[in-house]
Image (cartoon, rainbow, N blue to C red):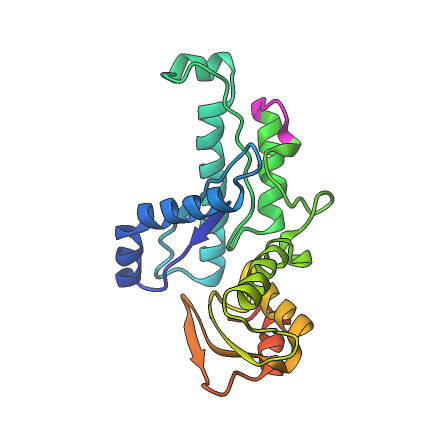
Amino acid sequence: GMRLVTPHSPEQHALESAHQYDECYGLAFAQQLKNKDIPEGGSKAVNLIDVNGLSPAGKNFVMRKSVKAFTDTILDLVVDTEETRERIVDYYGRKEVLYLGPDEQVIPEDIEWVISRAAKRGYDTPAAFMSSKPRSGINHKEYGVTSEGVNVYLDVALRHVLGIDPTRESFTIKMTGGPDGDVAGNELKILMREYGDNVKVVGIADHSGCAEDPAGLDHAELLRLVHGNLC
């Protein structure tokens, strides 16, 4: 899972830089737990990008260039060509197969470029180098793939740990992650689809802000933010 982190100020950039490794490790560890039954296991990539002082167009340009630079760096390490063999010191001694998946702020144009670059660089299975391709595979954000699984865990915890039947009883939720995100945005839609007025989202927060209401945030407004890809 590759995400792009673009802090809004020099101070925030410094804070993100200080805990970038810890964030990436924590995300990878969570992925490993979630993906324990598949051979790929779990991993994460966090690209911290300094966009302070840039115009919207400049920010977008730097983000796209960062995706390309990161992709080429990974391909330098894993593509087995005469050129890379001359420059890489390989202590592992075996071929490594890596897959990328789009996370925060990675757009379809990035995905298409990554696939074409992998093919150009000689990666054995370029179409498999990144998931959620616009014309094939499953778009995680559109179909809520991750969130559907998350909600199964939530439902089990509510029923068997807290003793709450969410289809009949009211319960509260606090969420980390904005309504424009893959997991949080789709989870909001699923919560309201499955439990209706029984679910009360009393707090929600991400890097751009937060909202809270002890009585529960307005469902219609939350869904408006989700469908509009708004923070």
Q: Is residue 110 above or below residue 105?
A: above
Q: Is residue 82 left or right of residue 110?
A: left
Q: Is residue 25 above or below residue 219?
A: above
Answer whether residue 78 is magenta in the image: no
**Most common secondary structure along the magenta stretch:** loop
Furthest residue to the bottom?
A: 215
Q: Is residue 172 visible?
A: yes
Instruction: Identify which residue is drawn at 67% across, 51% down.
Output: 139
Q: Looking at the image, how many numbered discs can be counted on the residues?
A: 0
Residue lying at 52% horizontally and 83% vertically, measured from the top left: 217
Q: Quadrant of residue 200?
A: bottom right
Which x, y percent locates residue 198? 61, 80
Q: In the displayed structure, would residue 45 be above or below residue 120?
A: below
The location of residue 227, given as percent across then percent down, is: 64, 70
Tell me if residue 181 can be seen: no
Query: Which sits in the foreground, 159 or 2?
Result: 159
Magenta residue span: 121-126
Quarter-wise, where is residue 164 in the image?
Answer: bottom right
Front in this rendered view, residue 91 or 190: 190
Residue 215 at what x, y percent from top left? Answer: 50, 88
Single out the residue that lies furthest toward the right.
135
- Residue 37 spot, x, y in % from top left: 56, 38
In the rendered image, residue 125 lying in the magenta stretch gets the answer yes
Residue appearing at x 53%, y 63% in the figure: 157
